Image: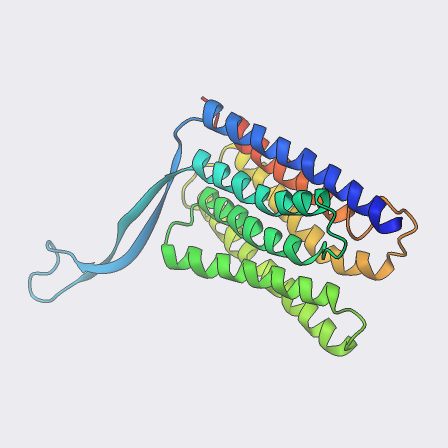
Amino acid sequence: MKDKKIFSTVSQYYTVGIIAYLILAVIAIKVMNEATFQVVSSYLTSNPLLSQTSTVFVPANHVLWSIQFRWVLVLLMGLSIVVPAYYVYSISNGVKKLDLHKYRFIDWLITGSLMTLVVLALAGVQDIMTIFITVSITAMSYACLWMAIHNYGDIEKYTKKIYSIGIITTALPWLLVLVYAISTIVYGSVRSPWFVYVIFAIGLFSSAVNIYGYTWHRSQNNKKKLVSDETYPILINQFIKVLFVLILVIGLKR
């Protein structure tokens, strides 16, 4: 009876999330402007004006892709639907043994990494390898924090080490964003639009929630059956994604 009640609640939450994501995807397509960010490959080339007697190298960029933010958000919403749809389908078809944590972690890793890509683009990070490495570090942070949370109590000393690695890998991308944000103000002599800083704040909140998850799971005694290990993460993740997309839609509306 307990599992049936939890499964029913999880299915309801995920169904609401799917509907919200679909609506947000349509809104993004209809409302957002065609603002883009570039992904470039950096390289060295010669300066023909200065290379009279010897080659003088200067940095340059080659634009690989110019991507509209709205299509990234549509992709984010599309990917966010996959795992909830799987769980809703499985629960609706009476699957009795269902791991409510495994695929949710995959969802968070993929969509969380994609949100990091958006944050990097808004900060001004364009180099493809910088983006790739930073997003990979973000994915690693999700993996470490998930391992720390779900292996808690097995081998305590290793769990704490993995958790520490998770904290460090969560913080590293934000160090990069901080440097770019400060450089924009100091060297660019301009402030980013308001919604960029709000997106940064939402991203930081999401990272803080992931880090806090370890402490929350340790102290959780599941007295509140409908706000448990299975349902609380769903609600907070849906809240973060919806707020993230709404702010970007408002900031980049036509």
Residue in the image at 53% along x and 37% along y: 196
Task: Answer above or below: position of 218 versus 88.
Answer: below
- Where is residue 8 shown, x and y percent of the image? 79, 41
Residue at figure coordinates x 43%, y 45% from the top left: 124
The image shows residue 130, relative to residue 235, as above or below, that is below
Inspect this view and state whether residue 227 appears: no
At 53% across and 33% down in the image, what residue appears? Answer: 248
Give the answer, above or below, for where 79 lies relative to 168: above
User: For residue 250, what is the image quadrant?
Assistant: top right
Image vertical order of residue 65 relative to residue 100, above or below: above
For the image shown, how many numbered marks are present on the structure? 0
Q: Position of residue 213 (x, y in %)?
A: 75, 56
Q: Is residue 75 visible?
A: yes
Q: Residue 10 location, x and y as percent?
A: 75, 43
Q: Extreme right residue here? A: 223
The residue closer to the viewer here, 138 or 52, is 138
Tell me residue 106's x, y (percent). 60, 56
The residue drawn where x is 69% and y is 52% is 208
Q: Is residue 116 left or right of residue 201?
A: left
Instruction: Work out which residue is located at the far front of the displayed protein and give it.
Output: 93
